[in-house]
Amino acid sequence: MTATRAAVPTNAIHMLGTEFHRLTPSATRLTPS
């Protein structure tokens, strides 16, 4: 039960990370480095 409950936030974080990584190229392209 604990492992299942722990897997939910981890999956949500992974989904957020994937979404952020997908949106990053647009932000980097607009940001002069």
Image: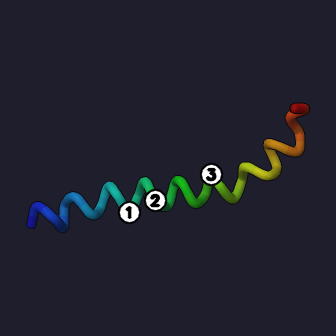
Q: Position of residue 11 (x, y in %)?
A: 38, 63
Q: Position of residue 28 (x, y in %)?
A: 81, 43
Q: Is residue 29 above or below residue 14?
A: above
Quarter of the image with the C terminus in it: top right
Which residue is found at the position 34% from the left and 57% from the top?
10
The answer to whether mark 1 and mark 2 are in CB contact below 8 A is: yes
Circle 1 is placed at which residue position? 11
Q: CA distance from mark 1 to mark 2?
A: 5 Å
Q: Which mark is residue 20?
A: 3
Query: Furthest residue to the left?
Result: 1
Q: Quadrant of residue 9?
A: bottom left
Q: CA distance from mark 1 to mark 3?
A: 14 Å
Q: Residues within 10 Å of mark 1 (few under 14, many from 20)?
A: few
Q: CA distance from mark 2 to mark 3?
A: 10 Å
Residue type, label 1: Asn
Is tag 1's residue or tag 3's residue first in the polypeptide sequence? Answer: 1
- Horizontal side of 23 relative to 18 (left or right) equals right
Q: Nearer the viewer, residue 33 or 17?
A: 33
Circle 2 is placed at which residue position? 14
Is tag 2's residue or tag 3's residue first in the polypeptide sequence? Answer: 2
Circle 3 sits in a helix, a strand or a loop, which is it? helix
Which residue is found at the position 79% from the left and 43% from the top?
27
Residue type, label 2: His
